[in-house]
Structures are given as structure tokens and as C-alpha cells.
Amino acid sequence: MKTKVNTLLFAFSLILTACGTSSKDESETANVTYQLTQLEDKVFMLDDETSVDGIEAQYTVIDGVEYYSFFNRPNRHIYFYNYKTGEIVHKIKLAADGPNEILYPYYFFEYWVHDFDNIFVNTMQFYYRINKEGEVLKRILVNQNFSFSQTRLSLDASTAFKNGKIYASNTSLVTAEGDTSWLRAIYDFEKGEVEKYLLDERTVLPDFEEKAEKIREMSKSGGISSLSFQFAGDDQNLYVTSQISDSLYYFENSELKEVYFAGDPEVESTDLDGFFTLSIITKSENSVSIGPNPTQPPHFVGTLLTSPDKQLIYRILVHGTKPRINPETNEEEPKIFGASLIVFDTKTKTSGSINLPKELVDQASLSSTFVTEEGIHFSVKEASSESEKAYKVFKVSKL
């Protein structure tokens, strides 16, 4: 398959002024100016078995080759495109039965690629290590039955694999009173057990006890709101934040070293009370449903993104949402009315913010993004063709 490139290059520049502040030592820092330029759209041609809807793509580099990858749930394949050429170069079929069976009974599915001989899959019930042929090299039963009290690994860009051990994020939905909620874990994949838990959530969330108590109460009725944390870096040098925090917490070998401002000085992110208004939980006699609140306060969306050289960290702050009527369902849904791109420089320890163009906010899914050497890729929501997956691409550069 070939990559379609628009012949018209639409470019513009926006000025980004940066400031850096440490909550431990608020010292003055020099202003930094960046240039944000829109490049040609990146378009990947889809095969007949892939729907343009529901693609959650990731970018990975294996043996020096750049890949665009996603999981196609209906046909149970993980796709790998050569990012440069846009051609499908490999498809991993996940068996539905037999010795290489991969189950995802809770619908949840995430994967992380170390290399083609070590691809890790998390389905909440099982952890798997597979290769590019779809062979299951290791299968670990984590939880026989789903429970709010269980913890699990979360596979993201900060995951590392060394000497048979996974260094990854750790997710705890409901924390018992008096217990610790750990944000990271070292998991021995050969033994099938956690070797060590790291990073107490209390370190990065001052209101942890209030949040834990609220979620424990919510879990009694069967529906909870889970505060998400984001990570950038690796097992030795790690930046941590949450979807409602304007700060980046910097750890060296799991020891907190510094806290930096990484938000928009003009738009303050919501607090814990505001977080619990992001979703609406509806209870009926036999079920509980959770949906987005049409009116949402400012909060961060997506993951922490890093430039290929690891120097820049990007995050996106939604300024808020207002209700709009979905013409297909005739129901209210949230519409983002503004958003900022936050850039944090890990060398200079400075951060900057810029308002994203309204056209981009309206056209793109701000929580579905990835970064290559070319720039930040924003997934286009409305496809011009069912056989194409398109991305708006923006380059961030320092003047």
C-alpha cells in the first residue's frame, strides 16, 4: 500500500513563548520561542479488512526502521506499516484458539513492541509475550475474574524490557484504606510476578486520600471514574503527571528530584473536584453506564508525547467543552472549544504553551496523536475516504 501525499503544502507559523518554573525553587528562566508549522497530511491506505474508525495507532522504531502500527480488532491482526513508504510490511494474526490463543474477554487490549521477537500484550486477564509470527512465547494468567481492587501493568511508551523483566506503569483502580497505590512496577516475565512496586501515587497527587475515598465509595455502586497518569522517559529517568496536573514530576531511579511547571499560564487545569465532573455515571436497576459530561472543565488529554531524540515532551490541554447535539443520535455530547499544546524541554527545563488552531481542534482527535521526526500527528476525525487514515502533521522547532 502507498502513502498518499497532498500536493498542496499548507504551512503557517505560530509563535510560542516559553517559561519554566520549578515548584521546589521558582527561579526566573529565559523566554524561548518556537515555531509551529503545518506540513503535508500523512495518509495511510487501509486494506479491505480495516475500518477507518477505531484505529488507535502507535509509532515505533525497530532496528532503525520506523513503523506505524495498530490493532485491528475485527480481524484480530496487529498491523505494521513502513512509516516512510506507507506500505503494509507485516501483519500479526492473533489466534482465537489453539496453543497460540490470545483472549481478551473484557474487550481491553493493549500492546507494546520491544522488537519483533518480544511483543507484549495485556488483556487485563492475561499478559502475553509473542513474536511477529503470532506465536505465544509466554502466557500469564493475571486475574481469573475482573475486580476493581486488582492492579495491572499498563503498557505505554515509557515501558522497557531488560533481562526478562518489564519496567512499566502500574494501574490500581480502587485502593483499600491504608494501602499504597503504586504507579510503576518491575515485573519478572519469566516468573510471572511483580518483583518490585515503585512510585507511591501520594508523591504526585496531594489529594490522594480524598480521591481514594471517593472512588471506594463509587465502586460500591459499580461505576467509577479512574484518574489517569501519564509517563515519559524510561526506568532511570522518568517524568510523571496526571490528566489534571499542570506539573511534571521528575524521578531519577525512582527518587523524586524536581517538579516543573508544564501547563498553560492562561488556562489552569481543573482540580480533583472538577475531575469527577468529567464523566456522568448513570445507574439503572440492572446496570451502570459511564459517559462523558457535555460540559467539562480544563483538563489534559492523551498521553505524554516525546520527540524522537527525547528532548521535548508534548502534552495537550483542553480548555473545556460545551454541549452540542449529535445529529445522528439527537443527544448532547461534548465539543471542545479550545486547546493548548504544551512543550517542555528536558534539557533547559523550560515549558511553553500555544493555542492550537481552531480548525485543528474541530477536525482532529486530540487524544489520538503520535510523534515522529517529521512532527506531531493528529488523527483526523472525519475521513474523506473509508480506505484512508489521515493525520494532520505539525512541526515544532525552536527559532
Image (spheres, rainbow, N blue to C red):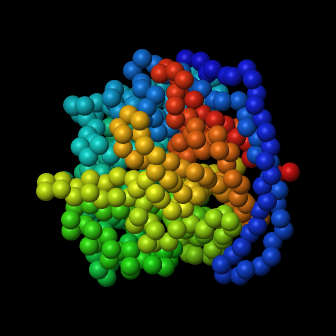
Which residue is pictured at 50% across the width and 38% down the height? 57
Left-right relation of 357 to 219: right
Give the percent coordinates (x, y) of residue 286.
13, 54
Residue 265 seen from this side: yes
Total number of numbered labels? Answer: 0
> Hey, which quadrant is residue 7 in on the image?
top right
**Vertical position of residue 304 compared to residue 47: above or below:** below
Q: Is residue 108 left or right of residue 384?
A: left
Q: Residue at x 26, y 60 (%)?
A: 223
Residue drawn 48% across and 25% down? 90
Is 230 placed left or right of 73 in the picture?
right
Can you give x and y, in whole percent of width and height, for residue 13 in the image? 80, 43
The answer to whether residue 375 shows anywhere in this view is no
Quadrant of residue 111 within the rendered picture: top left
Q: Residue at x 35, y 52 (%)?
A: 291
Seen from the viewer's position, the closer of residues 362 and 261 is: 362
Measured as percent of width and height from the top left, residue 35 is found at 80, 48
Q: Quadrant of residue 30?
A: bottom right
Which x, y percent locates residue 171? 38, 61
339 or 261, which is in the foreground? 339
Q: Single out the residue that lies furthest toward the right.
A: 399
Indicate whether 169 appears above or below 395: below
346 or 187, nearer to the observer: 346
**Quadrant into which the N terminus falls:** top right
